[in-house]
Amino acid sequence: MRQKILAQDIKRRVDLAEKLSENPDQPINYAYLATETEGYLPTDLIDLCSRAVHEALIRSSSERTSHVCYTLSAEARD
């Protein structure tokens, strides 16, 4: 169930955002994330997705061109 919530919320956010996409070279491992988030409530998972998208945008904000495409990936961040 957590895996489905995570995947659906990220897909929804990617679909809504013009310049946001998942990195095809480093696909998000939703099964792993679901295992790592055992005990999280659905609202916690939604917040996690929101923070991940926000972090992706912050990481990419240093690029000031109009053709920037922000990507979400499985890359680990501390």
Image (cartoon, rainbow, N blue to C red):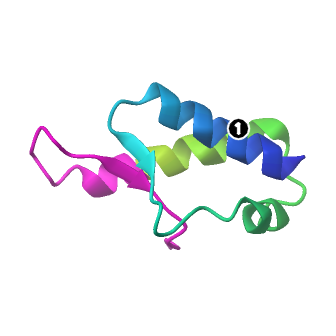
Q: Is residue 58 magenta?
A: yes
The residue located at (41%, 30%) in the rendering is 17
In this view, the residue in front, 45 or 28, is 28
Dividing the picture into quadrants, the one containing residue 42 is top right
Residue 46 vertical position relative to residue 39 in the rendered view, above or below: above
43, above or below 55, in the image: above
Q: Is residue 50 above or below residue 28?
A: above
Q: Is residue 13 above or below residue 70?
A: above
**Residue name at image x 34 percent, y 47 percent:** 57
Provide residue 9's location: percent of width, then percent of height: 66, 37
Label 1 secondary element? helix
Q: Going 16% across and 42% down the picture, which residue do you hit?
A: 67
The picture places residue 46, in percent across and down from the top left corner, at 69, 38
Query: Which residue in the rendered view is the most extreme toward the front?
Result: 24
Residue 18 drawn at (x, y percent): 35, 30
- 36 relative position to 27: left or right: right
Q: Is residue 72 magenta?
A: yes
Q: Between 66 and 44, which is closer to the camera in this rendering? A: 66
- Left or right, 59 with respect to 7, comes to left
Q: Furthest-left residue in view?
A: 65
Magenta part of the chain: 56-78
Residue at image location 48% in from the left, 45% down from the top? 53
* Predominant SS along the magenta part: loop
Q: Which residue is mark 1?
A: 8
Q: Residues within 10 Å of mark 1 (few under 14, many from 20)?
A: some
The disc labelled 1 sits on which kind of residue? Gln
Count every numbered label the image shows and give the total.
1
| Residue 19: % across, % down | 32, 37
